[in-house]
Image (tube, helix red, strand yellow):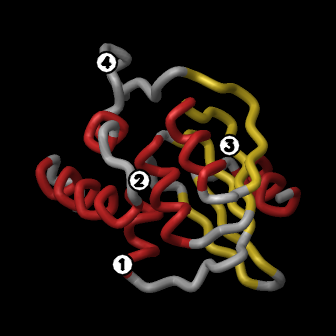
Amino acid sequence: MNKAKTILLKENLTCVLCKDDITYKSTLRGVKPLYQWLKESIDAKDFEAADKVVGKATAYLYVLLKVSTLYARVISRPALAVLKEHNIEVEYEMLVDNIINRKGDGICPFEAAVMTIDNADSAYIKIGEKLKEMGLY
């Protein structure tokens, strides 16, 4: 987890996946980079990950990517529960009730979209629908 965390913080990225000599980096915000990596069938099994903000939607994407560890600067309680349920080792700086949207006036639309979902495959479908609805993918 230290390598991914170091890269994330040093390079001011939004998320990082790494294992051995393989590293994936992104400056894209939200769920988009993880969703894109899944669409591209990136093999991230047993990778360590680091991310600035992890909500429940993002947590499900990390489950689907099959990472083994995750560092988050900010993580929501629902996201932490998902990661623990899937035996992903987690380190974080700040634990919050929910991830707030970019305007700061409500819950993140992706966190809201998966709030009642209890499995990664259904979450992935819902995230894809929300990305398209918002014109982000």
Task: Tell me: residue 22, above or below residue 114.
Answer: below
Secondary-structure class at tag 4: loop
Amino acid type, label 2: Val
Question: Real-space Cα distance between discs 1 and 4?
Answer: 29 Å
Q: Earlier in the sequence, mark 1 or mark 4?
A: 1
Q: Earlier in the sequence, mark 4 or mark 2?
A: 2
Question: Real-space Cα distance between discs 3 and 4?
Answer: 21 Å
110 vs 15, left or right, is left
Q: In percent of the image, x 58 and y 40: which residue is there? A: 81
Please name the residue that numbered disc 3 is placed on: 72
Residue 67: x, y in percent? 65, 68
Amino acid type, label 4: Gly
Question: Real-space Cα distance between discs 1 and 2?
Answer: 12 Å
**Quadrant occupied by the C terminus:** bottom left
Q: In percent of the image, x 50 and y 35: which residue is there? A: 78
The reply to whether dot 1 and dot 2 touch (C-beta < 8 Å) is no
Residue 91: x, y in percent? 78, 43
Q: Earlier in the sequence, mark 3 or mark 4?
A: 3
Secondary-structure class at tag 2: loop
Give whichever of 113, 7 is nearer the camera: 113
Amino acid type, label 1: Lys
**Circle on res. 106:** 4
Please name the residue that numbered disc 2 is placed on: 31
Please name the residue that numbered disc 1 is placed on: 39
99 vs 66, left or right, is left
Q: Earlier in the sequence, mark 1 or mark 2?
A: 2
Question: Real-space Cα distance between discs 4 and 2?
Answer: 17 Å
Q: In percent of the image, x 79 and y 50: which residue is there? A: 10
The reply to whether dot 2 and dot 3 touch (C-beta < 8 Å) is no
Secondary-structure class at tag 3: strand
